[in-house]
Every structure is written in C-alpha cells, then in structure tokens.
Amino acid sequence: MSLYTELVGTGRPRFAFLHGLFGRGRNFTGVAHALSEAGQGSVLFDLPNHGRSPWTERFDYREMAAAVAAEISERLGSSAELILVGHSMGGKVAMLTALEHPDLVSGLVVVDIAPGRSEVVDTFTPLVAAMRSLDLSALESRAEAEELLGVRVRDPQVRQFLLQNLRRKGGWHWQHNLGLLGTSLAAIGDWPPVTTPPYAGPVLWLAGERSDYVRDEHDADMARLFPNVAKVVVPGAGHWLHADAPEAFLSELFGFAARVDDPRG
C-alpha cells in the first residue's frame, strides 16, 4: 500500500508527522513550515483511510505501521533516521513503527496518547453520528454542511476539523473512510500486544494538561516499552496540543532534535 505524503522543506527530511483520527498530514503544515525555516524538512503522512491515502477493509495498527515503514524505506532508504512524530491514533502508529522498525527511527515524539486502551475515543461516537447525519446527496454548499453539522457539533473548531474531509468532486463525499472508521472506534481505542524488544532510542512524550488521554497509570507501560522516555505536560493544552500551544510544541520539537543529535543523550 502506497501512502500519500507531502514534503515540506528541501533536502533530506528530518521529521515525519502522523496525524490523529479524522485528520490528515496537512494538519501539521504550519509546524512543518516553521521547522523548514530552521533548515529541517518534514514529511507529512496521510494514514490509511484518511486524506488521499488508500482505504482498507479493516482497521489494524500493525498494518498501518508496516505501511508507514515501507513508505519511509522506499523514499529514504533503510537508514532513514527520521524523528517520527505521532498524535493520538497516529501516536500509536508511530510507537509501533519505532518498536518494529527501530532502524528507521532516530527519535520518537508521542503526542497525547499512551500505549494502552484509550477509553476517551468514545467521545468520537457523536462526531461519527453527526457526519453520518448529513444527507450528502441533497447538500448544496459547504456553508450548508457547516450549518447542519452545527446542530450536533457545537464547537466551531471541531466542525472545521471534520469538514476538512468533505469534498465535492463527483458529488459531495467524505474523503476519509467514514464507514470503516465509524465502526472501528473500539479497535482505534485499543492497543495491540507487543512482543518486540523495547525501543532504545530517545522518546519525547507530550501530554496536554487539560487532556484525559494520558494518565499517571500509563507511565509504567510507557517506561517499559520506551526506557529512554521523557514526559512533558504542556500547560493549558488539550488533546490537540499542537494546535492549542503551537509555540510550546515547536519549542519541544527543537529541543528534542538537539537531544537526538547529542550522543550523550
């Protein structure tokens, strides 16, 4: 499976970004441009069943990690040495990619997710219902879609996040695989058994202060799988902390890149 990617910056990329549920690689465009201005390029991934990447018949984290690893190997070679950044669902994909393909990952940034069951994924159930409630065959404009979606989704930022996936080419349709993703919330919230050795590289674990996705009881599992982890709680940020606190997020990425470059850790 060939995944859709976008390159931001010139030269060999340093970072690769994996988005969360109902997102796409372009969600990290602003971050990637800021990194590019400092001479560090990025690869933005559309994960399977999202954006312009292919759809699958089932949701499987290991298959997603394998697809990411294959794309990295094909484009950058077997010694890509990327700093892999994953948010939420993409964070689980990033963790598995690092665990199962450590040669491709020089450093790992896990954004507001943990290696375990994520009960908070149930909050997406009403969002799935809201998207399914739109009669796309009768829809006349994006403005009408936002108005109708607003009946069920009050937060304007969440509405815009969902509507980024609405496309008109060939008739209105959702660009993501809403059918599969909507029925796979339990699998999306889950975490597969891990039998690989721990990932020994440096790991930055970012958590939003106002988010419930990362809890103290996750610390032990994270330390077991990623013994070189450093946890940072971002003040005032929620689950989408890269949007809530972009300056702090960028500062942590720059600092982590320096840590990866320093052989003393």
Image (tube, rainbow, N blue to C red):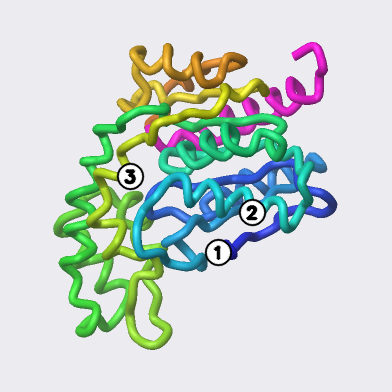
Q: Main secondary structure of the magenta part?
A: helix
Image: 98 above or below 234 = below
How far is the residue under mark 2 from the one under mark 1?
8 Å
Image: 62 above or below 57 = above
Q: What's drawn in magenta, residue-wise?
A: 239-265
- Looking at numbered disc 1 in the image, what kind of residue is underneath it? Met
Q: Mark 2 vs mark 3: which is more N-terminal?
A: 2
Q: Dividing the image into 4 quarters, which one contains the N terminus?
A: bottom right
How far is the residue under mark 1 from the one under mark 3?
20 Å
Query: Residue 3: where, in percent of width, then height?
Result: 57, 62
Numbered label attached to residue 70 = 2
- Looking at numbered disc 2 in the image, what kind of residue is underneath it? Ala
How far is the residue under mark 2 from the one under mark 3?
21 Å
Query: Residue 79: where, in percent of width, then height?
Result: 79, 42
Q: Nearer the viewer, residue 153 or 93?
A: 93
Say which residue appears at 81% left-offset and 19% top-offset. 262
Q: Which residue is mark 3?
A: 188
Query: Residue 64: where, in percent of width, then height?
Result: 49, 51
Q: Mark 2 vs mark 1: which is more N-terminal?
A: 1
